[in-house]
Image (cartoon, rainbow, N blue to C red):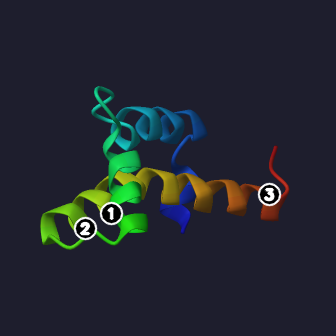
Amino acid sequence: MQFIDNIPLYVLLVICVLLGFAPFVPEPHIIEKLRMLSQGNLKKPMDIFDLFYHAAPFVLLGIKIFRMTKRGVQ
């Protein structure tokens, strides 16, 4: 967890915007994959990998924010 603590917050925010929402047009992949998951159409291994790939920055950001609030860091 020390690795996540050492990543600056602004870097994770930039990664979330660039990688998490890429490609921006016509629809971000994360939105498309979450829609496929909710409809039960997320079956191909490539689609599942793509969901994890685009969701990973948001998971790291969530862990970092949780750890910051737990430690009381502003």
Q: Tag count in the figure?
A: 3
Residue 55 found in image quarter: bottom left
Looking at numbered disc 3 in the image, what kind of residue is underneath it? Thr
Most extreme residue toward the front, as rendered? 39
Distance from label 2 to label 3 (Cα)?
31 Å
Q: Position of residue 27 (x, y in %)?
A: 33, 34
Looking at numbered disc 2 in the image, what kind of residue is underneath it? Ile
The residue carrying mark 1 is 52
Examine the rendered structure and indicate whether residue 21 appears above or below residue 35.
above
Query: In the image, 13: left or right of 47?
Result: right
Q: Are marks 1 and 2 in contact (CB under 8 Å)?
A: yes
Mark 2 element type:
helix
Taking the spot 40% from the left edge, 56% from the top edge, the residue there is: 35
Q: Are marks 1 and 3 in contact (CB under 8 Å)?
A: no
Q: Position of residue 14 (x, y in %)?
A: 46, 32
The residue carrying mark 2 is 48
Distance from label 1 to label 2 (Cα)?
6 Å
User: Which quadrant, please, contains the N terminus?
Assistant: bottom right
Work out whether residue 23 or residue 18 is closer to the camera in this orientation and state it: 23
User: Which quadrant, please, contains the C terminus?
Assistant: top right
Examine the rendered structure and indicate whether residue 50 appears above or below residue 41.
above
Mark 1 element type:
helix
Distance from label 1 to label 3 (Cα)?
25 Å
Work out whether residue 38 or residue 47 is closer to the camera in this orientation and state it: 38
* Disc on res. 69: 3
